[in-house]
Image (spheres, rainbow, N blue to C red):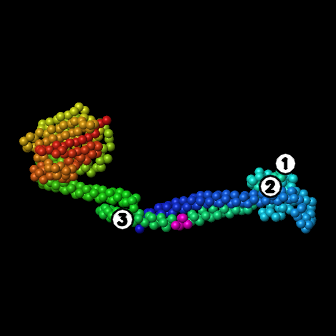
């Protein structure tokens, strides 16, 4: 069923029909012109052959009359010639012979030495065996022949040719109009039939619900290759949208769950504070909870921001300087961190976002290696094939292969992390990966027998 918004839009079927009608009209015009031209040429050649034949016959008759005179004529024929034409001159013989020529309005002229000695003045003088046209109100077709040193020009009216050409043009115009009308009507029907699979695909697309997009309606393949490509592209799009919507809903649910616990604790402490005398220690606790809550909200906002919106600047950032700031923020915990840096590890990006990546990476390593036999954290920055590689190594609880794969899922915390009662929300690794990819890099956990090795690969500044 068509949407009301589409009523004013042109239909693809009409476009196809118009295209077919125009194509038929052009094709009809070309076909009519070519066939008409060829037919006209063949007719003119046939008429010229006939006119030449008659011209040659007339020349033979004139030659015979001049050579044999009146000897072959009967007395009645001689008497009739004399009564009608007068003396037996070449002009009168020509007029007499024209009476038996079966042409429309025949006219003739005989020349000797370029001078008209019989017939009409003003007729062209074509070479023997050739035909020419004259123009004017009464056009003629004139063919030439010869006899006894004379040149004969025999003409007939060409008005029939003009009528034939007019009829030809009218037939062409009628053919074009008829072809366009028939092609338009037929093409409209054919176009609707041809586009029926597209309408069926459209109905399947409209069956996808916006509140919960599911690509099942588009899972069945289409018979036609072009529409199958379109169906596949729409199927992939709906599948990605459904996945993105599910992840957004899960993110909102998890975010609400993570915020609810600190907010409930903060509310309880505020209620106790309202009932008792102000206590600096309790106020300090509330302040720390507010700071952690603010950090959580900032992380959630960063994680919810598309990567293209995160990385819009291209300033040079020295990771050595960023790492120095991170070490100051870690305060006394920085004593457990060992650094191995190259000179000028410069990348392109946002300094604050890259700082959050390095801080989270080192803080996680410190948290999960605290209390271990070897609690050191080693941070190495090197250059490899035009890229800056940051590697953070600890010797803590470590991760299984399954845990390494799932670590990048937002709000995921491994069973060992939950059992260790190490504080966290499970969004740090997902946030680091999100920011790293926004900078054209990649973040991965390397398989090791003990502890954890996190590698951050970023393109070097150039």
Where residue 69 appears, as percent x and y from the top left, is 89, 59
Say whether residue 185 is magenta: yes
> CA gap, disc 1 to disc 2?
14 Å
- The quarter of the displayed image where residue 356 is located: top left
Secondary structure of the magenta portion, mostly? helix
* Number of marks present in the image shown: 3
In front: label 1 or label 3: 1
Lower position in the chain sequence, tag 1 or tag 2: 1
Q: Is residue 150 above or below residue 362?
A: below
The residue that disc 2 covers is 153
Q: Of residues 318 and 384, which is closer to you in this image? A: 384
Residue 113 numbered mark, or none: 1
Q: Is residue 410 above or below residue 164?
A: above
Q: Residue at x 70, y 60 (%)?
A: 46
Q: Is residue 122 visible?
A: no
Q: Residue at x 24, y 47 (%)?
A: 433
Lower position in the chain sequence, tag 1 or tag 3: 1
> CA gap, disc 1 to disc 3?
91 Å
Residue 456 numbered mark, or none: none
């Amino acid at each position: 069923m068509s949407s009301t918004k589409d009523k004013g839009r042109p239909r693809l079927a009409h476009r196809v029909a118009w295209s077919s009608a125009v194509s038929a009209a052009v094709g009809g015009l070309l076909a009519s012109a070519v066939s008409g031209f060829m037919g006209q040429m063949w007719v003119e050649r046939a008429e010229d052959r006939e006119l030449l034949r008659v011209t040659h016959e007339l020349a033979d008759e004139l030659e015979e009359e001049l050579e044999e005179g009146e000897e072959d004529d009967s007395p009645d024929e001689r008497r009739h010639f004399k009564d009608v034409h007068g003396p037996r001159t070449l002009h009168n013989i020509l007029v007499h012979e024209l009476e038996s020529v079966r042409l429309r309005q025949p006219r003739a002229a005989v020349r000797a030495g370029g001078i008209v000695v019989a017939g009409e003045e003003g007729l062209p003088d074509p070479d023997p065996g050739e035909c020419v046209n004259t123009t004017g109100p009464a056009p003629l077709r004139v063919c030439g022949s010869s006899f006894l040193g004379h040149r004969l020009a025999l003409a007939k009216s060409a008005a029939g040719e003009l009528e034939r050409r007019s009829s030809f043009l009218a037939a062409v115009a009628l053919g074009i109009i008829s072809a366009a009308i028939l092609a338009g009507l037929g093409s409209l029907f054919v176009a609707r039939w041809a586009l029926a699979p597209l309408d069926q695909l459209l109905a399947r697309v409209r069956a996808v619900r916006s509140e919960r997009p599911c690509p099942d309606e588009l899972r069945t393949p289409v018979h036609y290759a072009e529409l199958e490509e379109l169906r596949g592209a729409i199927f992939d799009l709906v599948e990605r949208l459904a996945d993105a919507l599910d992840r957004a809903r899960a993110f909102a649910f998890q975010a609400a769950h993570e915020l609810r616990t600190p907010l409930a604790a903060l509310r309880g402490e505020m209620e106790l504070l309202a009932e008792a005398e102000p206590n600096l220690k309790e106020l300090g606790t509330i302040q720390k909870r507010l700071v952690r809550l603010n950090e959580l909200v900032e992380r959630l906002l960063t994680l919810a921001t598309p990567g293209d919106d995160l990385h819009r600047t291209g300033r040079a950032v020295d990771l050595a300087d960023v790492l120095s700031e991170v070490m100051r923020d870690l305060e006394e915990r920085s004593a457990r961190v060992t650094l191995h840096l190259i000179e000028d590890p410069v990348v392109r990006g946002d300094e604050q976002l890259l700082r959050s990546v390095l801080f989270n990476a080192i803080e996680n390593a410190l948290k999960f290696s605290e209390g271990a036999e070897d609690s050191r954290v080693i941070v190495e920055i090197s250059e490899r094939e035009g890229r800056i590689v940051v590697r953070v190594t600890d010797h803590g609880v470590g991760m299984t292969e399954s845990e390494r794969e799932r670590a990048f899922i937002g709000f995921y915390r491994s069973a060992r992390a939950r059992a260790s009662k190490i504080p966290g929300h499970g969004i740090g690794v997902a946030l680091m990966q999100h920011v790293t990819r926004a900078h054209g890099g990649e973040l991965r956990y390397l398989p090791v027998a003990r502890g954890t090795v996190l590698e951050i690969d970023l393109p070097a500044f150039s």
